[in-house]
Image (tube, grey):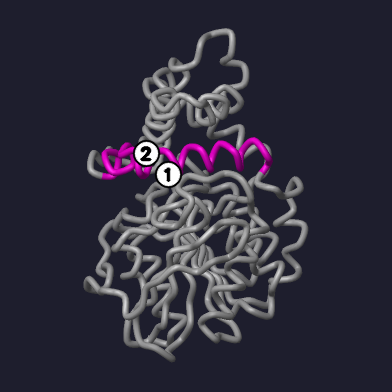
Amino acid sequence: MSNSNMLSYDRTLYPEIEPYEAGMLDVGEGHSLYYERVGTPGAKPAVFLHGGPGGGMAPSHRRQWDPEKYDVLLFDQRGCGQSTPFAEIEDNDTWRIVGDVEQLREMCGHDAWQAFGGSWGSTLALTYAQKHPERVTELVLRGVFLARQAEKQWLYNYGASELYPDQWDSFAGLIPEDERGDLLTAYHTRLTSDDRETRLAAAKEWASWEGTVITVLPNDELLGNMNEPESALPFARICARFFMDDFYLEEAQLLRDVEKIRHIPTIIVQGRHDACTPPRAAWDLKKAMPEAELWMIADAGHAASEPGIVDGLVRATDKFAGV
């Protein structure tokens, strides 16, 4: 699969599945997390870490593992999806979420589990694994984001703007010209405004920008879903806060501390044409962690729904289950 040139893919998501258990877990500080468990109780444990920050679960996320081979926990991170309080940015940071993952593992009674994450979820999976290497059996990573300054600048300053100049002009155009030198701060101010319409307008523009850059070809359905207030508002508010605070990580920390996790079997599924989290980060991680497998998908971008990415992720989870 490395440097794959396949343009047709025979692996698709597993059939639709309903949770065998769902509930809320109080993790303290006023936050409660919605979680679901799918697959076969007692089978190979895995945890799904969704993107964003500020994204959430979708029913399709349940289908990336063989339900006969896996026992998977999925959850909405703080402020996301059905977790409460909605769109909350207080007491919400990388390290608190890492702690939440540990609480969820203990709730499930697992000694260790597979950490599966894409985009921001890959950042979180790497952070969790470096904090608790003894609790991670494998890593499955998509669209690697290492939260370095260059990667943040690419998405919200200069980089993706050159590939999508029309959408960038719309994104930047919401902000008065005298504030455009620091779009992150300008958006964060509006996303935390006391005025609901101001918050919603900024959230929709933020979501439209990200929704545009994550697929190689336009996907109106995905873009429409991201623009719904219940999706756009937590996504934009939480994402902007994490960007403002450098994801609560030191510069290049995840590469610096990679020695802690080099023993963990790892598969990276990366779209060659990913304009959201460009392949440089996945390549840098592979160089720092040569034991990892990097599957570069020749005709894919960033989104987990693209055929080549789906194929790669399902092959990865199957491989780790011995399928």
Occupied quadrant, residue 34: bottom left
The residue under label 1 is 273
Q: Residues within 10 Å of mark 2 (few under 14, many from 20)?
A: many
* Dominant SS type (magenta): helix
The magenta segment = 222-246
User: Total label count?
Assistant: 2
Circle number at residue 211:
2
Q: Which numbered disc flags the more N-terminal residue, 2 or 1?
A: 2
Q: Is residue 134 above or below residue 244?
A: below
Above/below status of 217 relative to 196? below
Residue 173 drawn at (x, y percent):
44, 15
Secondary element type, mark 2: helix
Mark 2 vs mark 1: in front: 2
At a point 34% along the width and 38% down the height, the residue shown is: 229
Q: Residue at x 40, y 53 (%)?
A: 81
Q: In percent of the image, x 57 and y 25: which residue is there?
A: 189
Q: Are marks 2 and 1 in contact (CB under 8 Å)?
A: no
* Amino acid under disc 1: His
Q: Position of residue 259 (x, y in %)?
A: 76, 68
- Left or right: where 217 falls relative to 87: left
Note whether 219 is above or below 82 in the view shown.
Answer: above
Q: Residue at x 64, y 35 (%)?
A: 244
Q: Please name whichever residue, 267 or 63, is drawn nearer the observer in this view of the structure.
A: 63
State the image coordinates of residue 206 (x, y, percent, origin top left). 44, 31
Q: In the rendered structure, does residue 60 fall within the stretch colored magenta?
A: no
Residue 109's image quarter?
bottom right
* Distance between mark 2 and mark 1 Cα atoms: 15 Å
Identify the amino acid type marked 2. Answer: Gly
Q: Quadrant of residue 219?
A: top left
Checking the image for residue 217, the label placed there is none
